[in-house]
Image (spheres, coloured by chain):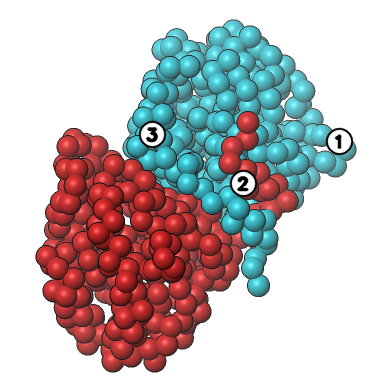
Chain colours: A red, B cyan
Amino acid sequence: MKSINIALIQHSFKKNKQDTINCTIDLIKKASGNGADLVCLQELHTTEYFCQSENVEFFKYAESFDNDIEYFSKIAKDNKIVLVSSLFEKRAKGLYHNTSVVFDKDGRVAGKYRKMHIPDDPGFYEKFYFTIGDNEFKPIDTSLGKLGVLICWDQWYPEAARLMTLGGAEILIYPTAIGFDRTDSKEEQQRQLEAWIGVQRGHAIANGVFVAAINRVGFESFGDDGIIFWGNSFIFGPQGELIAKAGDKEDEIVQMTLDMDRISQVRNIWPFLRDRRIEFYNNIMKRYID
Amino acid sequence: MKSINIALIQHSFKKNKQDTINCTIDLIKKASGNGADLVCLQELHTTEYFCQSENVEFFKYAESFDNDIEYFSKIAKDNKIVLVSSLFEKRAKGLYHNTSVVFDKDGRVAGKYRKMHIPDDPGFYEKFYFTIGDNEFKPIDTSLGKLGVLICWDQWYPEAARLMTLGGAEILIYPTAIGFDRTDSKEEQQRQLEAWIGVQRGHAIANGVFVAAINRVGFESFGDDGIIFWGNSFIFGPQGELIAKAGDKEDEIVQMTLDMDRISQVRNIWPFLRDRRIEFYNNIMKRYID
């Protein structure tokens, strides 16, 4: 593809699953109407971010995984878009994943990615809900090319970004649910937001790829002190140039046409992939070098 | 160490080696007088950045490698500092390295690091002068703790930053010589500068370490169109927070006291090292996943 029109759908949780999905669909239709080829949704977009507490009741959301796939398949087909969704997957009884399902323009499932790095921090008790993915870090092949779909906590790991790049991905896509703890100082909140943007910008630069993160907005409280999701969904270009960024409060579509030739231009002047010292990287497979 | 006073010495080339060294020494003394524990010099700080052309005459600079070590050993000892130098090493006839030699406060050589990633781009013909390093990516142990010494082009490689972190480095230090091509547009120059800062900021965040880069300033022309070295030497903290940054034109000492406890604080709230999926990283050792 020479160019791809990408749309990131950022929104708040609308009090229940149905209203939230309705909001998502309205925004998808709008993006599609504006020429989107590729629409990317935020992490666990059909529901609240339920991982704020450890509660077995929430496993009910994973029961509808197959129905959710069927539903969003139709949405992709109806809108003629490649669609990056983020769903709660029941794989077996008592075995769940945080899974992105990617649909092609004809509605077929192009691929799935099960979140590989799972966080567990106050307000983000994901290790209770999701087992770690057992797929490779492998891009998903679509009619728009290879998409490096990763999820939220993966965004802090240069290894994941590099592996997707080596696998041929030209856009890294991170459905995300991240926000502020209200009890943190303004300065700490600002540092966290900037770190979140900064580390992903680093992936764009180091790999010469586009990077898109789609984050939710709005305050949600289902335990602890609640989370103020900070929005700021963004797209960086392969030289780390900011292409677009959303605000921190409103539902928003971030939509831009990406010039995919830019990747070759940037990599040809800064050929980082040429000079990797792969014969000296083996210790990356260690937990720590004691 | 609970805290380390670090000084980065940024300066221009002073027309010849002796005058340039004299300038460096003056700045080192000043930094030491202001309480520096650790002084870091820019890449190939004793001379011009001669890699702008391929010229066998410049190998003469490597002849004095042993003398240079002796000289800077004494400087470290006299000033009671850990000193990160960057020298042109003759290892054997016709075999040269771009090498950082690190001296401890007593003048002994704490360790050497031979640049592992070697660039070769118009104006930066380093593959002509330097063979690739054959050391591991291993921090250098000093009385101030383990230093993750890397050099310039290494700064674009997340693998190098990660390996130094896994080896226990708490500060990554990059002696650097990077600048603008005068024929590039202002916008391109700005993007390059921001990418250079951004990728290293990413290393700080992803690894929870301090990152310091020491770059030269001033215009040097020994071939092609010359290079305007862009200075901007900087220090980032382990959350990617900017601690200090130099300007783009003047000789300057960037000096700050680093609170080393900050690393534990940041890593404890964002424990990225905990969740690495090392059993799925093996493809990083591939050139490309075809």
The foreground one among B171 and B152 is B171
- Residues at marks 3 and 2, CA–CA distance in whole angstroms: 21 Å
Residue at 50% from the left image edge and 30% from the top image edge:
B171
Q: What amino acid is found at the position of numbered circle 2 in the picture?
A: Ile
Residue at 57% from the left image edge and 25% from the top image edge:
B146
Crowding at dot 2, Cα within 10 Å, few <14 / some 14-19 / many 20+, comes out as many
- Residues at marks 1 and 3, CA–CA distance in whole angstroms: 46 Å
Q: What amino acid is found at the position of numbered circle 3 in the picture?
A: Asn
| Image location (x, y in percent) of residue B107 | 65, 12
Q: Which mark is residue A16?
A: none
Q: Return the residue at label 3.
A: B268
Quadrant of res A99: bottom left
Q: Is residue B107 visible?
A: yes
Q: Return the residue at label 2.
A: A284
| Image location (x, y in percent) of residue A103 | 39, 82
| Image location (x, y in percent) of residue A157 | 47, 51
User: Contact (CB < 8 A) between labels 1 and 2?
Assistant: no
The foreground one among B184 and A18 is A18
Q: Return the residue at label 1.
A: B92
- Residues at marks 1 and 2, CA–CA distance in whole angstroms: 31 Å
Residue at 48% from the left image edge and 41% from the top image edge:
B273
